[in-house]
Every structure is written in C-alpha cells, then in structure tokens.
Image (cartoon, rainbow, N blue to C red):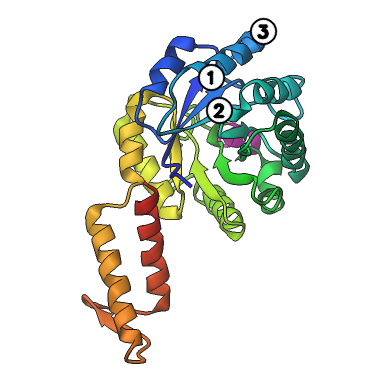
Amino acid sequence: MNARRCELSVPGSNLKMIGKAAGLTVDEVLLDLEDSVAPEGRPDARRTIISAAREFDWSGKRLAWRINPVSSPYFYQDLIEVAEAAGDKLGAVIVPKVNRPEEVYTVAALLTAIETAKGFSQQIAIEAQIESAEGMLNVEKIAAVAPGRLEALIFGPGDYAASIGVPGLTIGGKVEGYLGHLWHYALSRIIVAARAHGLEVIDGPYGAFKDIVALEESALQAKLLGCDGKWAIHPSQIEPIQQIFSPAQAEVDRARRLVEAYAASLTQRQGAIRFEGEMIDAASVKMAERTLRRSGAV
C-alpha cells in the first residue's frame, strides 16, 4: 500500500483546480462532492469528477472522491453514479460524518455490487471520517466493519468541534486559553481503534492555509501521536506535510542498525542489549521495523 502522508482535497466542481492537482506530487488527491460543493452544483460536479478520473493522468498518486453522508439525499447518486462510470480509475471513496458502523457496511455492500456488475479488477477502498460525538462514541465498532475494504479513518476537526461544543473558528486550529494539544484525546482514540484493526489514520485539515508554521506544528503533533498523514486544502501545504510524515534518513539508518544489532545478538541467545547508549529489546525492534516500513512505503 502506498503511503497516505498527505491527502489533498479539491472541489469536485472545479475542473481547473482538478487539472492542476493531477500534476502535483502528492500521495492522494480527493475530489470532493460534500462541503466544498454547493448542493445545486453536485450533479455537474459528479460529471466533472467522472471526466477528470478518466481523462487526466493520475500516475504516481491515489485518486479518491468524497461523497455526501449516507444520511443525505445526495449519497446514493454520489456513490453509484461516480463508481459505475469511473470506479476502475478511483482507488478510494471517502465517507464523511460516519456515525455508526452500518453506514460503512452500506457503502461496502453497494461497492461490491457495482464492482461485480462492472467487472472491475480492483476494489475501491473506503476511508471513513469521524466527525461527531456519536461517531467518536462508536469508533471502535466503525473500525471493525468491512475488513479488507476499509483502509483508513480520518479525523474531521471542524465538524467534531461543532459537535462537542469546542469554541473557535479555525478548522483544526488552537483555541486561545487551552494549554495542551486540543485534539489529543480525539486523535488518540481514533488511532487506537484503527490500529486494532490494521487501519491507517489521517489527521484532518488545518484551515489557515497561509500559516505554514502552525500547520507544521499541527502535523508534527499528529505524527507524534501515531497518525500516518494529514489532509491538505491548498497545494502550499503538501510539501511540509509530506516532509513531516516521511522518516528522516538518519532515523531510517539508525532503525536499520538497531534491527541488525538485535538480530546479531540473538545468535548469542541474548535478550536486551546495549545499543548506541541505550538498552533495546524486542519492542525496540518493532518500533524500528515500523520506521523501515514507512520509509519503504514512501
């Protein structure tokens, strides 16, 4: 699986922006039918996404589209119309505002039917957004649905803040007076649920796209908690996000030395050993191997 260090969100109604996104170096581009598209513009946006998926060159990146919530009147057309016409060109569908596991199951069942009917050779993955108090309450059950189809959980800080009553007007931003990391609990809970079922975790967007310093701080905090990547809402955010979520060469080199040193110690039937000024054991190897896997995915 390719890394999801950065997912760039592009309005599905804007063909010019979609064309520009096709030429960018980014892990995933998501063509949006939800918040960034006015309701009256969604039928045209579906057709734009279908054309863009089939006509532009998306080599080197995963192409996804975001539908409207399962509870909305736009859901079934967003999913079926686009998947039937361009599902063989789309790697994933992003399902927003997931509150219950049944919503993911519904999308998975429809995708299976579409793929079978159309004869697609590869299945379309699902990425589920956790954006409400109800979704957070059910996140463990959501993560367990559709194994092999559900690949990632995404945190939606804007809708989540509104759902639980957090003050503030910047999506993903800080709230003056709160001294810690505002999204520590939410991200940690999503991460634990995702990892228990082998899923990736993507942090949500940072709305103040011109404030690169604050974006980098937000991305670093998400990385340190265990996230695999972060959303971008502007091309200027791609490079700093992908750099932060890429293991540094020094980190990769040290991880490789650690694995080799521990493997050599096993021939002497040793357990914990000294390595470059610290004690390491089998848990250290697991940490190092994850770094090496991430460097390979990138």
Residue identifier under label 1 = 54
Which residue does the image show at 32% across and 79% down from the upper left? 262
Q: Would you say residue 165 sits in the magenta stretch?
A: yes
- Report how far apart the C-alphas of labels 3 and 1 lie in the structure: 24 Å
* Amino acid type at image mark 3: Glu
- Report how far apart the C-alphas of labels 2 and 1 lie in the structure: 7 Å
- Image position, residue 221 (x, y; %): 40, 48
Q: Which of 91 and 68 is in front in this view?
A: 91
Please tell me the numbered disc located at residue 77.
none
Q: Would you say residue 99 sits in the magenta stretch?
A: no
Question: Seen in the image, is 40 located left or right of residue 224?
Answer: right
Give the mark nearest the N terminus, 2 or 1: 1
Is disc 2 in contact with disc 1, using a CB cutoff of under 8 Å?
yes
Residues drawn in magenta: 159-166
Please tell me the numbered disc located at residue 40.
3
* Amino acid type at image mark 2: Lys
- Report how far apart the C-alphas of labels 3 and 2 lie in the structure: 26 Å
Q: Nearer the viewer, mark 3 or mark 1?
A: 1
Which residue does the image show at 34% across and 53% down from the upper left? 295
Q: In which quarter of the image is residue 252?
A: bottom left
The answer to whether residue 173 is seen in the rendering is no
Q: Which of marks 3 and 2 is in front?
A: 2
Please tell me the numbered disc located at residue 89.
2
Give the mark nearest the N terminus, 3 or 2: 3
Q: Which of 242 and 156 is in front in this view?
A: 242
